[in-house]
Image (cartoon, helix red, strand yellow):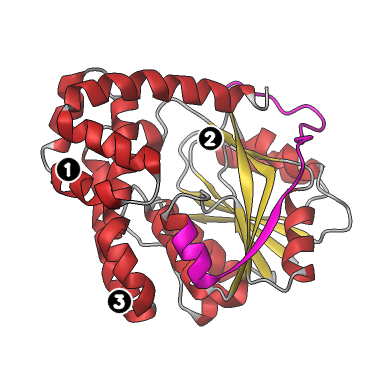
Amino acid sequence: MISVIIPLYNVEDYIEACLDSFELQSKNVEFEIIIINDGSTDGSLEIVERYIKQSELKIIIISQANAGVSSARNRGIDEANGKFICFVDSDDLVQNNYLGSMLDIIENKDCDMVICATSSVEEEFVLIGNNQSSSPINLKIMNSNEALNGFLENKFTTGVWSLLIKKSILLDNNLRFSDGFKYSEDLEMVWKMIASSDLIALTSEPLYIYRIRNGSAMSYVDERRMDGLKLMQALEKYFQDKNPVFYLEFKKYGVARWVWSTIWQVAVASVNYNAFSNFLKDINTRKYMKSLLSFSQTKVKVSAFLYLVSPSVYFIIAKVKGKERLKRKINSIT
């Protein structure tokens, strides 16, 4: 069985659509949905309670005082009855083969973890029927070191919501989301999941649908993002103990890659250049950008060099390119 863990907090406009997308899952996949109500103050909980009464899905509600998404996900891990676990955000959607496709891969390829591709949609998107991609599906099997290096080099991307993992990997390695952090806590967990898995499968099939909302964590331009920097710095010590070989690469590029990605997101989200530069004043950005001049990926090296030459020009280009990229991602499914 698969345990689907969904943290719930003030998403009354989206949670029903999220659950509806699980009604369409293949009937031969056994799964439970564990909803951790993290102290919602709107009508989210009532909507789920009404939904349970008219649905045949196995939905379990567990309520707790508001403690944050990490606490909610950890509670879900503790309560999970399945052999496999996946995490879904309550404002997102899944394709009707989300569970079935990943379950087939993880069992038939004898993997510890499978990662799928993601589609991005606008806030008002409504899932009607089958929106599956018609593109050829590529499947790659990697050992832990191959996957760690591929993730570092941006050869693939994933959030904690676009994967399926054996529960035993989490329990045997005491993997938990870091409490008290409001940004990149999911990214830190993904790094640890990959490091703790022997074999990881990567499918190009976009099985998860990520809803881009105003006010989401990606739009933060404040001190909350600094949580991510702390977590990435702490990962250096984790890899030094867990995987000394990969530690050398992560020490050189891991935190720098996070900074590179974050300043691009901040540039896109900032209302003006002053807001962008004010955010960066507490990060030694130039140090990290210099280290990326020897990085393997050309676009990372070029953009790092551009930032070092002129942060203001970098800001302008990031604003333009970021909007173009977002539009392309959304158009790929709508």
Q: Could you tell whether 92 is left or right of 154 in the image?
A: right
Residue 131 in magenta stretch: yes
The amino acid on which the numbered mark 1 sits, given as a three-letter code, is Thr
Relative to 137, is 76 above or below?
below
Between marks 2 and 1 in the image, the one whose residue lies nearer the viewer = 1
Describe residue 31's horizontal placement relative to residue 249 as left or right. Answer: right
Label 1 neighbour load within 10 Å: few <14, some 14-19, many 20+: some
| Residue of label 2 | 11
Residue at horizontal 24 percent and vertical 61 percent from the top: 233
Tell me what residue is drawn at x 25 percent, y 52 percent. 229
Sequence-first tag of 2 and 3: 2
Q: Secondary structure at mark 2?
A: loop
Residue 212 rendering spot, x and y as whole percentages: 51, 29
At 75% from the left edge and 62% from the top edge, which residue is drawn? Answer: 105
Is residue 101 magenta-colored?
no
For marks 2 and 1, give the CA distance. 35 Å
Q: Residue furthest right?
A: 28
- Give the percent coordinates (x, y) of residue 280: 16, 36
- Tell me which amino acid carries mark 2: Val
Query: What segment carries the magenta color?
Result: 124-150
How far apart, in angstroms, are the residues tagged by discs 1 and 3? 24 Å
Write down the residue under mark 1.
285
**Where is residue 98 shown, x and y percent of the image?**
73, 49
Kindly indicate whether the residue at mark 3 contacts the one at mark 1 (C-beta within 8 angstroms).
no
Image point (38%, 55%), residue name? 185
Q: Which residue is mark 3?
A: 240
